[in-house]
Image (tube, rainbow, N blue to C red):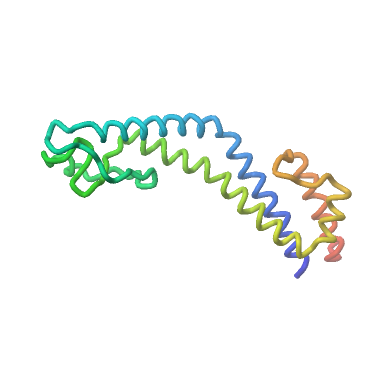
């Protein structure tokens, strides 16, 4: 049973570093999307404060949430008492390219969250098997979230070798 927990630590470390690597490969896209989305929401916030040519003061009392990024129904903008792009229910129509950008941004940045989640789980399980990982860290360089893929492969190989010995599989 202890071997399974040790193996789980190695797996979680691998997953953590792989998710972080996936994020780093797309980080430039995430930064570009972030800037574009911030600019879009900043500009859409300003335009919702402008007086409406259709009557009313045009001020939107609801702050649009970046989490509600699905477009509103097509017919909702047809109400003549409502500012363009919004409906009487407070929904906001978002251009498809902005929706796509936001979805891509969430997918990319989710890799960081998953990385930290797996790293934390590995830390928790490693505390239950301190001696094994202290020894492994002593022989190999300790893994960090800045470790290279080469460091990860060497660390995991050594850990698996020791687990095979413990389980008498050699």
Instruction: Give the camera-side residue of 155 and 86.
Output: 86
Query: Where, quadrant-wise, is the C terminus in this rendering?
Result: bottom right
Residue located 76% across and 46% down the image: 143
Could you tell me which residue is drawn at 45 percent across and 30 percent down? 35
Q: Nearer the viewer, residue 43 or 95?
A: 43
Residue drawn at x 56%, y 48% as measured from the top left = 113
User: Residue 132: which quarter of the image?
Assistant: bottom right
Q: Does 42 sit above or below residue 63?
A: above
* Quadrant of res 1: bottom right
Count numbered badges in the picture: 0
Establish if 33 lies above or below 132.
above
Please provide percent x and percent y for residue 153. Answer: 76, 44
Q: Residue furthest front?
A: 57
x, y percentage for residue 77?
17, 40
Q: Position of residue 37 (x, y in %)?
A: 41, 34
Residue 167 picture location, percent across and down: 83, 66
Q: Residue at x 54, y 30 (%)?
A: 28
Which of these two is toward me, 148 or 169? 148
């Amino acid at each position: 049973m202890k071997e399974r927990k040790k193996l789980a630590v190695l797996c979680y470390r691998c997953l953590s570093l792989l998710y972080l690597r996936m994020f780093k490969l797309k980080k430039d896209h995430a930064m570009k999307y972030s800037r574009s989305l911030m600019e879009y929401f900043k500009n859409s916030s300003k335009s919702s404060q402008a007086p409406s040519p259709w009557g009313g003061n045009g001020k939107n009392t609801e702050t649009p949430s970046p989490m509600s990024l699905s477009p509103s129904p097509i017919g909702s903008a047809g109400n003549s008492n409502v500012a363009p792009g919004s409906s009487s229910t407070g929904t906001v129509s978002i251009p498809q390219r902005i929706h796509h950008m936001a979805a891509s941004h969430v997918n990319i940045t989710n890799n960081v969250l998953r990385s930290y989640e797996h790293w934390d789980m590995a830390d928790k399980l490693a505390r239950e098997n301190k001696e094994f990982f202290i020894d492994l860290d002593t022989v190999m360089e300790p893994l960090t979230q800045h470790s290279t893929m080469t460091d990860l492969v060497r660390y995991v190989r050594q850990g698996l070798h020791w687990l095979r010995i413990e389980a008498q599989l050699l």
